[in-house]
Image (tube, helix red, strand yellow):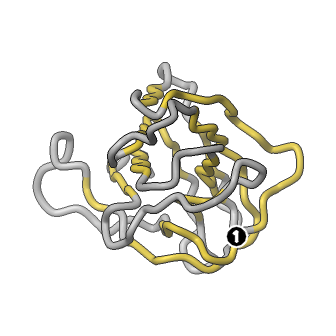
C-alpha cells in the first residue's frame, strides 16, 4: 500500500513572492533524486496568498511544470499525512525544496497547468482517481509550482499531497 505524504513551502522556509510580472518564481518543488528512484503521484495541491492583500486588486498567475535539474532552494522533508496514515511508516523518498534563489531547470513544453486566481482567493486541485500528476522514477525528475504577479509581492502558500 502506498504511503501518503505532504509538503508545503512553510515547513522551514519563508514563502515570499518578490518577483515581477514577467517571470515565474519557483515556490515549491517535489522531485526524485538519484539515491531514491521511486515514482510518486501528486493527487492534491493548493495555493493561496497568505498576507494582507495588495491595495490594487490583482491576479496571481501560477504554473506547474516538469523539472529536470534542481536549482538552489530551501530543502524540506515531506511529512506523513496524519489523517490517512497511522503507525510507523518509512520516510519519503521524494525530496522537496521551496523558495528558490536559483531556479530549477524546467522542461520545455512540459506545463501541466497554467492559470490565475485573485489575490483574495485560494486555488485547490484534487485529482480524480487515476488522474494524479505522475513523476517518473528518473533522477532529477519532478514538479515545480511557480507563481508571478504584477502587484502582489508578499507570502504565497503552496501545499502538495502525494503517494509513493
Q: Residues within 10 Å of mark 1 (few under 14, many from 20)?
A: some
Q: Residue at x 78, y 50 (%)?
A: 22
Say which residue appears at 34% left-offset and 52% top-offset: 6
Q: Nearer the viewer, residue 164 or 133?
A: 133
Front residue (pair 60, 85) = 60
Q: Is residue 43 left or right of residue 11?
A: right
- Residue drawn 88% across the image and 43% down it: 109
Is residue 101 visible to us here?
Answer: yes
- Residue 137, percent from left and from top: 65, 59
Residue 156: x and y, percent?
43, 50
User: Which image quarter is the N terminus in?
Assistant: top left
Instruction: Give left or right: position of 79 versus 153.
Output: left
Instruction: State the SS at label 1.
Output: loop
Q: Which residue is mark 1?
A: 103
Residue 73, given in percent of the width and then of the height, sits at 55, 76
In this orientation, does residue 163 appear? Answer: no
Amino acid at each position: 500500500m502506498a504511503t501518503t505524504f505532504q509538503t508545503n513551502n512553510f515547513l522551514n522556509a519563508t514563502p515570499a513572492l518578490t518577483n515581477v510580472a514577467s517571470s515565474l518564481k519557483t515556490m515549491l518543488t517535489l522531485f526524485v533524486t538519484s539515491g531514491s528512484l521511486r515514482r510518486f503521484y501528486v493527487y492534491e495541491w493548493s495555493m493561496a496568498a497568505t498576507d494582507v492583500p495588495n491595495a490594487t486588486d490583482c491576479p496571481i498567475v501560477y504554473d506547474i511544470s516538469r523539472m529536470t535539474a534542481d536549482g538552489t532552494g530551501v530543502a524540506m522533508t515531506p511529512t506523513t499525512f496524519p489523517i490517512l496514515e497511522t503507525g510507523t511508516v518509512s520516510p519519503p523518498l521524494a525530496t522537496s525544496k521551496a523558495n528558490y534563489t536559483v531556479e530549477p531547470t524546467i522542461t520545455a513544453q512540459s506545463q501541466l497547468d497554467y492559470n490565475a486566481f485573485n489575490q483574495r482567493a485560494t486555488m485547490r486541485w484534487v485529482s480524480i482517481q487515476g488522474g494524479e500528476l505522475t513523476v517518473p522514477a528518473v533522477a532529477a525528475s519532478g514538479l515545480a509550482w511557480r507563481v508571478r504577479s504584477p502587484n502582489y509581492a508578499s507570502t504565497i502558500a503552496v501545499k502538495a499531497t502525494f503517494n509513493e
